[in-house]
Image (spheres, grey):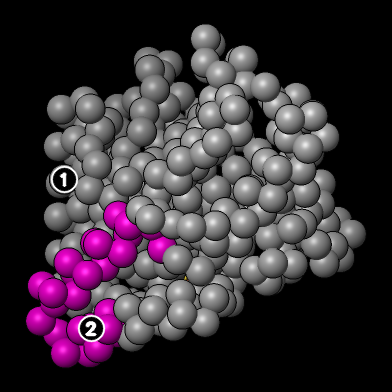
Amino acid sequence: MQRETEITALTDVMAKFTSYIGKRLPNDVKDKLAELRTFETNPLAKTIYMSMADNQDAADKLDRPSCQDTGVIQYFIKAGARFPLLGELEDILRNATLGATQMGPLRHNAVETFDEKNTGTNTGSKIPWLDWEIVPDDDSALIDVYMAGGGCTLPGKATVLMPGEGYEGVTDFVFDVITSRGVNACPPLLVGIGVSTSVETAARLSKRAILREVGSHNPNENAAKMEQLLEEGLNEIGIGPQGLTGKNSVMGVNIESSARHPSTIGVAVSTGCWAHRRGKIRINADLSYEIISHKGAVL
Ligand code: SF4
């Protein structure tokens, strides 16, 4: 393939995939919502879970976005250093966002800060947002697409705790965030927690945490235990679907961490809503692709 042809082909795939995930939830989220619906005993909560499932079916059949807020488009890229279109990927993803905005259609959600003007294209300064990791000795690219909706982004918070506050301080922080603003994010929530040195490293990890599958566990035994305890504790509050009370508050709690400065505990929370629209796709060096998040998806 000529380079221009390759660029056009990959732009088309990413535009279609970005549009696709706005209409269909990933398998892990869909499965978890079905499980929560099955175990729910509160009649109102059960009805809400059923209307969520009906909404998803209708979006799929009618080929329309499943929530009016299709968010700000964010791409989290793990690119091999030898991926053939590495240098072109930024432009490709920007054009893919333009394409998906037409194709979806996606609501226009990019407002230029300080100009206070909607660009009307879902693109703008540093938007779509790109988060990069370069993988040595690899020639593929693994791309997570995320629609950062307003409500589900609103509870996000980061702080740096005194070291003596320990894991109890992390727990207090998470509960404060979820009980004060979690209801804005259309529960049941996927709660992402980053624990690191500073606000920005913790925040980035907390967003990475909600890109991890529902039901997956941190490989560190202690972190996995904390995920489980926080999930149980948050569920005991019984926020329920859409915040109208019920058996559960969350779809899960995912923690990502890094080594940190001994004198600080940076902690951040990001939340995903019940319509947690994200997708994972692997692009191979020959530009063939594999959709990981949505089994059987056809673009
Ligand atoms: S929180 Fe999620 S489901 Fe609720 S309006 Fe925002 S994007 Fe839609």
The span picked out in magenta is 25-50
Label 1 CA crowd tier, 10 Å (few <14, some 14–19, many 20+): some
Q: Label 1 amino acid? A: Gln
Figure quadrant of the C terminus: bottom right
**Is residue 89 shown above or below 95?**
above
Determine the residue positioned at 54% across, 29% down. Answer: 284
Mark sitting on residue 228? 1
Q: Is mark 2 within 8 Å of ligand 1?
A: no
Q: Main secondary structure of the magenta part?
A: helix
Q: Position of residue 15 (x, y in %)?
A: 66, 54
- Horizontal side of 166 relative to 225 (left or right) equals right
Residue 26 belongs to the span the image colors magenta: yes
In this rendering, does residue 158 appear at all?
no
Residue beneath disc 2: 45
Pick whichever, 273 or 146, lies toward us. Answer: 146
**Is residue 95 shown above or below 56?**
above
Q: Secondary structure at mark 1?
A: helix
Q: Secondary structure at mark 2?
A: helix
Q: Position of residue 259 (x, y in %)?
A: 38, 17
In this rendering, does residue 63 appear at all?
yes
Q: Position of residue 240 (x, y in %)?
A: 25, 75
Determine the residue positioned at 46% across, 80% down. Answer: 61
Q: Label 2 amino acid? A: Ala
